[in-house]
Amino acid sequence: MTETMILDPADPNLVFGATGLLQTFNAAGVLGPADVHAATAIARLAGEADDRVRLALALTVRAVRAGSVCIDLAEVHTTSFDTSEVRIDLAGLPWPEPAAWLEAVRASPMVADGHDHEGGRPLRLAHGLLYLERYWLQEEEVRTEWLSREERNPPELDRDRLTGALDRLFTGEGLPAGEPDQQRRAAAVAALRWVSVIAGGPGTGKTTTVARVLALLLDQPGLDHRPGRGLRIALAAPTGKAAARLEEAVREAADQLPAADRDRLGELSASTLHRLLGWLPGSRGRFRYHRGNHLPYDVIVVDETSMVSLTLMARLLEAVRPDARLVFVGDPDQLSSVEAGAVLADIATAPGPDDTALDRGLAALGLDSEPAPPHGVVRLSHTWRYGGAIETLARAIRDSDADAAIDVLRSGAEDVIFVESDLDRADPAGLEPLRERVLTAGRTSHDAAAAGDVEGALRGLDQHRLLCAHRQGPYGVARWGAEAEHWLIEAYGSWAVPAAPGSPVSGRDRTAEWYPGRPLLITANDYELGLYNGDTGVVVATEHGPRAAFARGAEPTVVSPVRLDAVQTVHAMTVHRAQGSQFGCVSFIVPPPDSPLLTRELLYTAVTRATDRVQVFGTVDAIRRAVLHPANRASGLRPRLRPASSGS
Ligand SMILES: Nc1ncnc2c1ncn2[C@@H]1O[C@H](COP(=O)(O)OP(=O)(O)OP(=O)(O)O)[C@@H](O)[C@H]1O
């Protein structure tokens, strides 16, 4: 929901009847109606009359909506909750004095005070942070499940076989002289631990490494090596699109393995995490597999882990047998999940105790040139897919080097275009590269779709994607999607629109609405169809009438439009929604420098969605601001990823 500062009696964001601090913070746009209502109702039930405690509760609810797991009462007055598209002046608000506020919260009957306090209260104050109890429990679950896997005796392995397989599968060929083979190291760590992370940016060979890790494990003696028997392997990702990409990429990587390894691997398919966990209709977050009914797999690989929320990670970890290997794959520098948590980034940056078992294991494999990485996280840094200006730009953003990022943007490189333009205007200058890409990709997709070519239409769809940070306003999806649609109509005429301009909705020609090449966005999960919020597809003309096609590994999902409940036309989308996908060309509308959404992770994620060309539209000030401002998601996981005895 967009927050606003405007005090308008008809404003749906204002809660009439709110009192005290809740009213003030609601009127200022810090708290939304959901936060105020939740805090009022819970405080009433708990008999809590202290205004400051009600405010703390409402802010905790607000923080979760903005992606944080908890709040720090001493810091919250400086927090810009980053779902807001408008910056709110926090300094002018009547923030309670922090020490007294903390004491009031600590004494409240709504608050369980301390790590070990019994549960059953709505809030928990632990390690200086205030949580909704539900998120505290999930964070504890992730922490303890992760640590219990670290503390178990390492998996038993035949070291000689492992060394032989590492030598066969990781030759280091193609790496610059002297550069250590981090893929080999990541594979060894994945084999030697119950839980590990293969981290890296696009094209660093994460999936290639996954295929080889699986080959290493299948090479171990004592297993029935027939595909589908012996070692039971699951591949999963948070979205349908990401699962489809994982399946395809593992298949391609497997094709490059020596024949015997390839045969042992067989055909692997990937699913969404929801499907893996056994989504139950109408169960509101309960899954078929859980602590009391573990998943049957021996190895579970999860791709695009940056998109996994705290809640989903907690459900996954409890559902996985303690003696199953978990390999997480992802890019910790990307935006975090839409829902609360930044689990991958937390784990990838958490300090850890010395891992002596892993040190010994790596030494036995001759991989002891560096100490064992904390928490089994190995970062791949060599890029194999492309080395052009996109990579240089991504690296500069990740390294927080604003001057270097601006140099690349202005370098005139073929694959990085920077249009320095004031997008706040009605008719901004320099949009020609954007218009050209919109028209070319639209044409390709339409022509293939009109000819009934599903694959071609889907390929056209991925040729170009227009990304924004905001939904509304001069920098938002609504404006830029309409702009793109306008260009398409102007260039190609009526096929590019759902109905003739100006025609009343009731008089709409239903077939015209499903015109070939119409780009679609799914806006709610549909587990029956296996389509998920954020999936994109395209309408294709078939002999049976128009059909909606979605990329799904080897076989696209093709469904009748009447079966789609939550779908809209997508000419532009948010960067968040584009996570887990890549496109030939990406055009990114950079928000203004004062946008709370403008973070390093946002810019990095937008830029790295492109494989061949990125077009950035905005100002140098906004780029500089983004590069220098990392996202700020509060969570207690990073500092607490160590045994409780060493840090409560
Ligand atoms: N060690 C290697 N030697 C040669 N080529 C490699 C190596 N590792 C990866 N590649 C090649 O680099 C490309 C990217 O690899 P891969 O798809 O595994 O990367 P990724 O990190 O999974 O990428 P993304 O995150 O974009 O999906 C592939 O074409 C792959 O064949």
Image (cartoon, grey):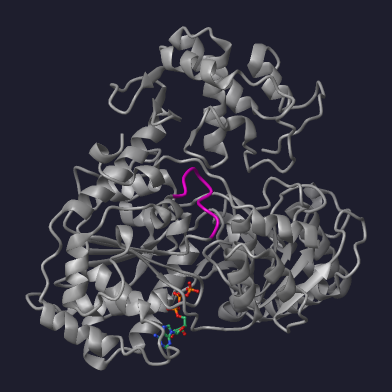
Using the rendered view, name the quadrant where residue 468 is placed.
Answer: bottom right
Q: Is residue 77 left or right of 486 when viewed as pictured?
A: left
Q: Is residue 243 magenta?
A: no
- Identify the image quadrant of the C terminus: top left
Inspect this view and state whether residue 277 appears: yes
Q: Nearer the viewer, residue 44 or 345?
A: 345
Q: Nearer the viewer, residue 280 or 548?
A: 280
Q: Is residue 404 left or right of residue 152?
A: right
- Horizontally, residue 439 falls left or right of residue 535, namely right
> Picture coordinates of residue 156 (x, y %)?
10, 67
Tell me: residue 414, above or below residue 127: below
Q: Residue at x 34, y 34 (%)?
A: 137
Residue 501 x/y as whole percent: 87, 58
Q: Is residue 227 visible?
A: no
In the foreground, 414 or 400 = 400
In the figure, 286 relative to 520: above or below? above
Q: Is residue 445 above or below residue 568?
A: below
Q: Could you say where residue 577 lies in the image, as x and y percent from the top left?
A: 59, 57
Coordinates of residue 310 in the picture (x, y in percent): 41, 45
* Quadrant (top left, top right, bottom left, bottom right) of the N terminus: top right
Magenta stretch, residue numbers = 334-342
Drawn side of residue 366 relative to residue 120, left or right: left
Give me the residue at 71% from left, 28% from top.
13
Q: From the viewer's perspective, is residue 320 above or below residue 24?
A: below
Give ligand 1's quarter of the image.
bottom left
Quadrant position of residue 222: bottom left
